[in-house]
Amino acid sequence: MILASTTFIIKDDQILLGFKKRGFGMNKWSTFSGKLDRDENYIEAARREVFEECGLNILSLEERAVIKFAWTNNNDKFEVHAFLALKFEGQVEESEEMIPEWFDLDKIPYDKMWPDNKLWWPLFLAGKKIKASFLYGEKNKLLEHKIDLMP
């Protein structure tokens, strides 16, 4: 199981997304995500990934989701903890990996993202805490999903 974090950065009814220039998820818009480094917890990974990918310093986070991903065509299995950045500082900057851009919350480019995003992001953005799992097949086609609300 690959452990990872992802962080939603929201300000004034807008969300900061990054266009992935390389690696896993290339040519898709997403939140700022990455694998945990050795001896790193989910919060530390979330802060580090946001800083590396868009230059912001995260001051406060709220965990809102635990999402599991798997693929039928390989052995990759991810457990991703999703956070909302409650406080942050700094200047948004492009990195080697991501081109950051602010989007209005009602104009999120779901058609240029992973298919699961349109299923669980609205719940997350509405303040719900969720636990979900997604199974992908060939050509990253979403085959199965389950989404549960957490207390």
Image: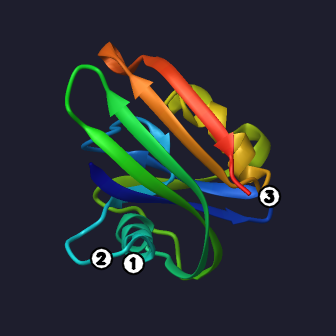
In the rendered structure, the answer to whether residue 7 lies left or right of residue 72 reads right
Q: Quadrant of residue 50?
A: bottom left
Label 1 environment density (alpha carbons within 10 Å; few <14, some 14–19, many ≥20)? some
CA distance for labels 1 and 2: 6 Å
Q: Earlier in the sequence, mark 1 or mark 3?
A: 3
Q: Are marks 1 and 2 in contact (CB under 8 Å)?
A: yes
In the rendered structure, the answer to whether residue 47 lies left or right of residue 16 reads left
| Residue 70 in picture, x, y percent from top left | 35, 32
Q: Which residue is mark 1?
A: 44
Q: Quadrant of residue 49?
A: bottom left
CA distance for labels 2 and 3: 31 Å
> Which of the labelled discs sits on residue 13, or is there none?
3
Q: Amino acid at mark 3?
A: Asp
Q: Which residue is mark 2?
A: 40
Q: Secondary structure at mark 1?
A: helix
From this view, report whether residue 138 is shown above or below residue 96: above
Q: Nearer the viewer, mark 1 or mark 3?
A: 1
> Camera-side residue: 36 or 12?
36
Q: Amino acid at mark 1?
A: Glu
Q: Amino acid at mark 2?
A: Glu
Q: Residue at x 52, y 30 (%)?
A: 112
CA distance for labels 1 and 3: 26 Å
Is any part of residue 87 visible from this angle? yes
> Which of the labelled discs sits on residue 100, or is there none?
none
| Residue 52 in picture, x, y percent from top left | 34, 70
| Residue 77 in picture, x, y percent from top left | 30, 40
In the rendered structure, the answer to whether residue 4 lies left or right of residue 93 reads left
Q: Residue at x 68, y 63 (%)?
A: 10
> Camera-side residue: 45 or 108?
45
Q: Quadrant of residue 141?
A: top left
